[in-house]
Image (tube, rainbow, N blue to C red):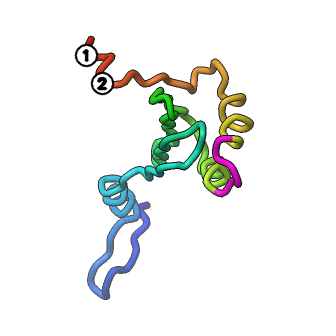
């Protein structure tokens, strides 16, 4: 049985359709940071992926990164200290960390 939400007296839209439309229009959140460690982060709440660009331009993607952790990261007094204590050490050498090569290196420049 499919859930339907009333749009008007004569029209109903399925919850599945609303979620599909949202996913199609969704843009992950990117933030710039003033930090001695971090340059930029992007959080994709649909995929639970947290991508971090460090000030040295190295970039890593952390998968299975729950929204609660992302919110705590954003609300932390220091994002760099939070990252070191709660992200780096939690995801150390795990399957959920992916190093992203920059375009120049991957092209062989």
- Most foreground residue, 21 or 73: 73
Magenta stretch contains residue 79: yes
Height in image: 46 above or below 62? below
State the image coordinates of residue 67 (x, y, percent, origin top left): 59, 50
Say which element carries label 2.
Answer: helix
- Image quadrant for the C terminus? top left
Q: Is residue 50 magenta?
A: no
- Residue 92, located in which quarter of the rendered image? top right
In this image, 89 relative to 11: left or right? right
Report the disc number at residue 103: 2
- Quarter of the rendering occupied by the N terminus: bottom left
Residue 93: mark: none
Q: Tell me which segment is drawn in magenta.
A: 75-80
Q: Nearer the viewer, residue 13 or 30?
A: 30
Q: Residues within 10 Å of mark 2 (few under 14, many from 20)?
A: few
Relative height, residue 2 to residue 94 (above, below): below
Residue 31 lies, with reference to residue 4, above or below; the image says above
Could you tell me if the residues under marks 1 and 2 are in contact, i.e. CB atoms within 8 Å? Answer: yes
What residue is drawn where x is 41% and y is 50%?
A: 28
Quick one: SS at disc 1? loop
The dot on residue 107 is: 1
Determine whether, in the image, residue 39 is placed left or right of residue 14: right
């Amino acid at each position: 049985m499919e859930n339907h939400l009333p749009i008007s007296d004569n029209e109903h839209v399925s919850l599945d359709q609303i979620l599909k439309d949202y996913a199609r229009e969704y843009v992950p959140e990117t933030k710039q940071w003033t930090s001695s460690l971090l340059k930029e982060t992007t959080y994709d709440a649909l995929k639970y992926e947290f991508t971090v660009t460090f000030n040295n331009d190295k970039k890593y993607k952390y998968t299975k990164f729950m929204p609660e952790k992302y919110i705590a990261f954003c609300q932390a007094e220091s994002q760099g200290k939070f990252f070191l204590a709660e992200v780096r050490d939690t995801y150390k050498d795990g399957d959920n960390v992916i190093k992203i090569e920059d375009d120049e290196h991957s092209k062989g420049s």
